[in-house]
């Protein structure tokens, strides 16, 4: 990571994975390190973290902790399908674009079927069209529909939209999976109860992201459909996701879920994205590509402007979603960070416009 002369290391906008561990997660991790505990998830920290997640969703559910989002999504989808089934997902979904084929690998060949949809979102009509398009034996039978909340282009599904998708999934016997790598940002932005966009909308299994919101490592796979969770513990073991010292994966969740810390951190990331949007949307040469609804701003920038920003040491991606540049804010992004980047972007745009 680059630094400026005589200054502290710069916070960047490439990914919320760049951010460190939130202090509340760090404190819980230290507390869990105080003494011996049973291994393989039989410790009190893992049990307490699972119970805390049940309290968040206000319902009985089965909770499993895994190392990362790729494993969470891939194993959850594999557990919901047979090898001759297919998974309906958006054409720019993370499971399609950025998992290196892991869902198909862990699903023993189950196929991802890509569906269109404005602003990164699936529609009930699109799902039904995919289900009814073919029903012959030569076609991989649709078995699961998966949505990303927040989407890969930073937009959100409303509770009503998710209920409509859930109803369509139920009509056609599909299981409903949610990739919630940035679920915290979605809840902070929508201001709804977590239950409203999960089990009350028909979601069978949620991959609840913690890493992008201040946890050092680990995601929670939450089965609201408890029958579907049967033997998922064996799948996590086979998939290399059973941590022997599980408390160091689960304990930070306690620090984050206590007193709604997870929502406060997600809310900060969302606010910083909104500030970024306001500062850059009217700059010459800048085109905002999608509504800013969570913690990401997608912009189309002239190539010389991108290169000028890179030359000044800023890091951001230009290959995520449907193109353009992604400016991702994190739990620890500050107003100073945003204004500093926006000032350099304004200078680069002004130079390019001459």
Image (tube, rainbow, N blue to C red):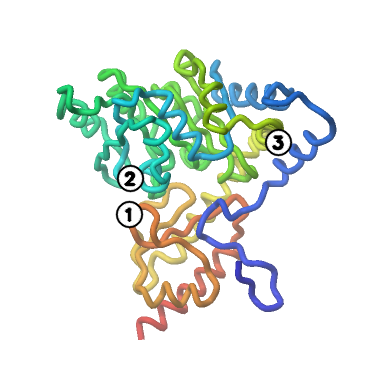
Q: Position of residue 9 (x, y in %)?
A: 66, 67
Total count of labels: 3
- Taking the spot 47% from the left edge, 37% from the top edge, the residue there is 180
For disc 2, the neighbor class at 10 Å (few under 14, some 14 to 19, many from 20) is many
- For label 3, the SS is helix
Q: Quadrant of residue 81?
A: top left
| CA distance separating discs 1 and 3 | 36 Å
Determine whether 341 is above or below 322 in the image: below
Image mark for residue 248: 3
Residue 64: x and y, percent?
57, 26
- Residue drawn at x 69%, y 69% as measured from the top left: 8
Q: Which residue is mark 2?
A: 120
Residue density around tag 3, few if under 14, some if 14–19, many if 20 or more, within 10 Å: many
Q: Nearer the viewer, residue 150 or 45?
A: 45
Q: Looking at the image, do the residues carrying marks 1 and 2 touch, with CB atoms under 8 Å apart?
A: yes
Going by the image, does 237 lie left or right of 175? right
SS of the residue under disc 2: helix
**Marked residue nearer the N-terminal end (1 or 3):** 3
């Amino acid at each position: 990571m680059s630094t400026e002369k005589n200054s502290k290391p710069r916070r960047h906008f490439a990914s919320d994975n760049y951010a460190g561990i939130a202090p509340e997660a760090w404190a819980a991790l230290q507390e869990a390190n105080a003494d011996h505990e049973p291994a393989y998830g039989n410790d009190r920290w893992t049990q307490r973290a699972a119970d805390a997640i049940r309290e968040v969703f206000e319902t009985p559910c089965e909770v499993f902790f895994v190392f990362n989002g790729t494993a969470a999504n891939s194993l959850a989808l594999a557990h919901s399908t047979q090898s001759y089934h297919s998974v309906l997902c958006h054409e720019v979904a993370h499971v399609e674009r950025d998992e290196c084929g892991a869902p198909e690998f862990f699903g023993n060949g189950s196929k991802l079927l890509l569906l269109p949809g404005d602003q990164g979102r699936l529609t009930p009509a699109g799902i039904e069209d995919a289900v009814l398009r073919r029903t012959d034996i030569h076609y991989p039978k649709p078995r699961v529909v998966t949505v990303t909340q927040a989407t890969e282009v930073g937009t959100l599904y409303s509770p009503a939209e998710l209920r409509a998708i859930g109803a369509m999934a139920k009509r056609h016997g599909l299981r409903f999976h949610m990739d919630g790598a940035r679920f915290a940002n979605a809840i902070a932005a929508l201001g709804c109860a977590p239950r409203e966009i999960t089990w009350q909308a028909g979601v069978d299994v949620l991959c609840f992201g913690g890493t992008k919101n201040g946890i050092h490592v680990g995601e929670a796979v939450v089965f609201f459909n408890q029958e579907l969770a049967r033997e998922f513990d064996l799948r996590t073991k086979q998939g290399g996701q059973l941590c022997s010292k599980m408390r160091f994966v689960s304990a930070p969740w306690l620090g984050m879920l206590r007193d709604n810390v997870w929502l406060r951190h997600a809310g900060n990331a969302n606010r910083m994205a909104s500030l970024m949007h306001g500062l850059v949307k009217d700059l010459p040469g800048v085109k905002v590509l999608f509504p800013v609804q969570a913690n990401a701003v997608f912009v189309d920038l002239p190539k010389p402007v991108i290169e000028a920003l890179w030359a000044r040491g800023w890091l951001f991606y230009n290959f995520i979603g449907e193109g353009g540049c992604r400016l991702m804010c994190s739990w620890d992004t500050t107003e100073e960070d945003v204004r500093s980047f926006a000032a350099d972007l304004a200078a680069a745009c002004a130079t390019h416009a001459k």
